[in-house]
Image (spheres, rainbow, N blue to C red):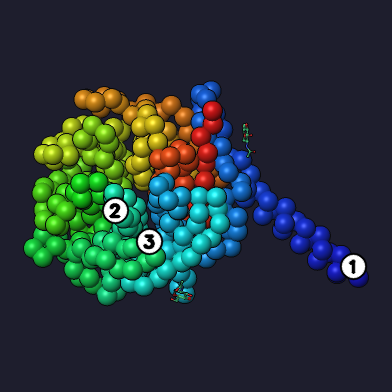
Amino acid sequence: MAAAAALLVLLLLLRAAQGLKAFNYSFPWNGQQQMYELDIGWPKLPEYFTGQTFCVAVDSLHGLVYVGQRGENVPKVLVFSEEGYFLYSWNDTVEMPHGIFVLNTATDSSVWITDVGTGKYGHTVKQYSPSGKLLQVLGTPGNAGSSLIPLQFDQPADIFVEGSGDIYVVDGDGGMNNRLLKLSDDYKEIWLAGTNGTGIGQFRIPHSVTVDLFGRVWVADRDNKRIQVFDKVTGEWLGSWSSCFSEDGPYSVRFTANHKYLIVAQLNINRLAILAAPPVGSIGDCVMVSAVQMADETKPHLVDVDMKSGAVYVAEIGAQQVQKYIPLG
Ligand SMILES: *[C@@H]1O[C@H](CO)[C@@H](O)[C@H](O)[C@H]1NC(C)=O
Ligand SMILES: *[C@@H]1O[C@H](CO)[C@@H](O)[C@H](O)[C@H]1NC(C)=O
Ligand SMILES: *[C@@H]1O[C@H](CO)[C@@H](O)[C@H](O)[C@H]1NC(C)=O
């Protein structure tokens, strides 16, 4: 009997500890206003996260959230509704997803995934239909390289595709390449920026990429602990920010729905930094206006923003889940 009672107490304690996972960890930054609150009801059933959750992408037009996860015998892509219901998953030809991006055009929508696997589907950037049908493969599957003819990647980290079809790839996540590549809609090189190094326009693990409304390309230059910005037409270097990243480098770059802020994950300090997005022209210095502090070992890796509701989704490698943060006010 005593043993059964002890077991019951243990189970209750475990339940309580699980509840803590859903605790509200956001707090006002330096007395600044709190901008987001955790949606503890998203997703409805966290049991679907069975691997390491590396990336997330929102299709705000259709209310879908795509999650890329890694692991043995786990589905690699999970699809949820924005309300948090699990819808379906897919697998084929995805090895080790790193970055993910949803492209909506006037006629259809698709999902781009960067794959850092080393098997026969690895070292590629792939386009899928929403249901997981492989539509396009960029790179040379199974072969790491730095060539442009034929196109080769080595652990491509992230991708951004414009409505025009122009593609930006950061390559890569620790492989032989440290470059930002712009490709046309027929997958030809338009320009290339960056080599391995710490100088202006060089990279040490270009980890995430996005493009703003003013024609500027933003790159999280992770191991150089800075964000670098380039002109999207010419590839010319426009500036860099490092003062916000003395404690930890930037892992993600994504703009908020109102384009006023950048959301930057800092994996090692378990933080989302919210930075003021500079208006057209010079990028000036970086200003952190708010932050979301997460629990130890959460390890936020990449994020995405619902451009309709403004919700921020965070793929957390440590906590092995994706969480949703809702803008306040
Ligand atoms: C999170 O904390 C803030 C204040 O710190 C509070 O206003 C908000 O209601 C909390 N959210 C949840 C889901 O508990
Ligand atoms: C994906 O493949 C794994 C085995 O690698 C399997 O366990 C899982 O059920 C598959 N999921 C889907 C949705 O196909
Ligand atoms: C980049 O340069 C550093 C310092 O010279 C070196 O340690 C590192 O291995 C290089 N990385 C690649 C991918 O060549």
Give the CA separation, mark 1 to mark 2.
Answer: 65 Å
Q: Please give the label number shown on residue 107.
A: 2
- Residue where numbered disc 1 is placed: 2
The C terminus is located in which quarter?
Answer: top right
Give above or below for 160 relative to 242: below
Residue closest to the eye, 212 or 124: 212
Asked whether disc 3 touches disc 2, contact meaning CB atoms under 8 Å apart, the reply is no
Disc on the earlier residue, 1 or 2: 1
Q: Residues within 10 Å of mark 2 (few under 14, many from 20)?
A: few
The quadrant of the rendered image in which ligand 1 is seen is: top right
Residue 130: numbered disc: 3
Identify the residue at image location x=33%, y=55%. Answer: 109
* Spot occupied by residue 119 in the image (x, y as percentages of width and height): 29, 74
**Quarter residue 233 falls in:** top left
Mark found first going from the N terminus, 1 or 3: 1
**In the image, farthest residue toward the right:** 1
In the foreground, 325 or 166: 166
Q: CA distance from mark 3 to mark 2?
A: 13 Å
Q: Does residue 289 lie above or below 105 as drawn?
A: above
Depth check: give the residue in front, 21 or 223. Answer: 21
* Residue kind at label 1, given as amino acid type: Ala
Tell us which disc is closer to us: 1 or 2: 2
**Mark 2 residue type:** Thr
Query: In this rendering, which labeled residue sits more in front, label 3 or label 2?
Result: 2
